[in-house]
């Protein structure tokens, strides 16, 4: 049975100067209806994701102008009084799916050719002796530049770098793994970062989305770089990490602790290379299910689907 929302909740649009106070909720002053508004929002959410992959490929010097051209066209189409054709918006949404895949391919190519093909690796979840730097987000470029600068400053014995959340798979890339300063992984989902960052005694670096406004517990120990930015937090320009490194050297030294290990690095090339063995195990009943987990939980009650799924399996 379909659930029908009251008309005043069917849409909310406040994207232009003609919008009513509080936004248009029944029909836009421009003339668009709730269905058109929903299609525009679906497209906007979609191209946000595509732009993230595209941006990180650009960070390491890889580009596909067709992706940038589509993003410009799609974004422009959502401006007021540009396009009222629902079918054309549906076509743009579907095209974004195709372009999104191309952006993923571009980023995969960029990272493999820049940082090497990922290899399965066990990553420590404990700590090593030394001052700590925790890197969160998606930018392997930022992580690489930080590790390189630590090496150039001959501080690999003094400073240990830990990944957090989405940065965890970086350990599998040979050109990142080769740095002595890259030690392990600290914490889990971005949802818990305020607690985990407060507990981390060293410096934190936010490199992309999924970084939150800090609490007072670590306000003076967090920096941003690249696309990321936080109010009242120092931002690293041109990958000059000297201010961050100097601040890290002022923090308490962490003691060695064995917290066990986690496995990562099963890139699609690794899985394909094992396809014959995997087929044997599947046909022999040794592997009964293959789960592809890709998504992002939210802090709202009942929205921890992926965390719950991985706990169950």
Image (spheres, rainbow, N blue to C red):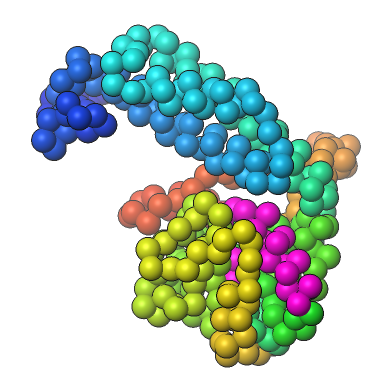
Q: Is residue 147 magenta?
A: yes
Position above or below: 173 against 187:
above
- The structure residue drawn at horizontal position 58% and vertical position 74%, both measured from the top left corner, is 244
Would residue 137 be found to the left or right of residue 33 on screen? right
Position above or below: 220 against 284:
below
* Depth order, front residue of 271/68: 68
In the picture, which quadrant includes the N terminus? top left
The answer to whether residue 92 is visible is: yes
Would residue 249 be found to the left or right of residue 264 on screen? left
* Depth order, front residue of 201/51: 51
- The structure residue drawn at horizontal position 38% and vertical position 68%, both measured from the top left corner, is 232
Residue 157 percent location from the top left of the image: 77, 83
The answer to whether residue 258 is visible is: no
Residue 294 percent location from the top left of the image: 57, 44
- The structure residue drawn at horizontal position 56% and vertical position 87%, both measured from the top left corner, is 251
Q: Is residue 123 magenta?
A: no
Residue 202 percent location from the top left of the image: 56, 80
Residue 88 percent location from the top left of the image: 42, 11
* Depth order, front residue of 301/145: 145
Position above or below: 231 against 304:
below
The boundaries of the magenta stretch are: 133-153
The quadrant in which residue 120 appears is: bottom right
């Amino acid at each position: 049975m379909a659930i029908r929302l009251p008309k005043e909740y069917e849409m909310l649009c406040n994207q232009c100067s003609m919008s009513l106070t509080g936004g248009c909720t029944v029909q836009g002053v421009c003339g668009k209806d709730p269905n058109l508004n929903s299609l525009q929002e679906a497209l906007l959410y979609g191209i946000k994701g595509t732009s993230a992959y595209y941006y990180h490929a650009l960070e390491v010097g890889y580009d596909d102008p067709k992706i940038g051209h589509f993003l410009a066209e799609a974004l422009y189409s959502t401006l007021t009084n540009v396009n009222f054709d629902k079918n054309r918006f549906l076509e743009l949404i579907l095209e974004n799916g195709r372009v999104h895949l191309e952006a993923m391919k571009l980023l995969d190519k960029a990272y493999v050719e820049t940082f090497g093909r990922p290899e399965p690796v066990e990553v420590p979840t404990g700590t090593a002796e030394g001052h700590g730097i925790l890197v969160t987000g998606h930018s392997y470029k930022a992580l690489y530049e930080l590790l390189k600068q630590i090496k150039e400053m001959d501080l690999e014995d003094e400073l240990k770098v830990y990944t957090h959340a989405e940065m965890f798979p970086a350990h599998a890339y040979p050109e990142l793994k080769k740095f002595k300063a890259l030690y392990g992984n600290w914490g889990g989902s971005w949802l818990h970062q305020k607690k985990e960052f407060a507990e981390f005694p060293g410096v934190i670096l936010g490199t992309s989305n999924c970084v939150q406004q800090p609490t007072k517990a670590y306000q003076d120990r967090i920096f941003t770089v690249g696309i990321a930015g936080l109010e009242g937090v120092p931002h690293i320009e041109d990958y000059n990490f000297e201010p961050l490194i100097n601040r890290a050297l002022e923090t308490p030294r962490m003691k060695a602790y064995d917290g066990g290990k986690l496995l990562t690095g099963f890139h699609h090339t690794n899985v394909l290379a094992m396809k014959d063995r995997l087929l044997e195990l599947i046909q022999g009943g040794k592997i009964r299910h293959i789960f592809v987990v890709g998504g992002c939980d939210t802090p709202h009650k009942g929205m921890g689907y992926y965390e719950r799924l991985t706990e169950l399996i």
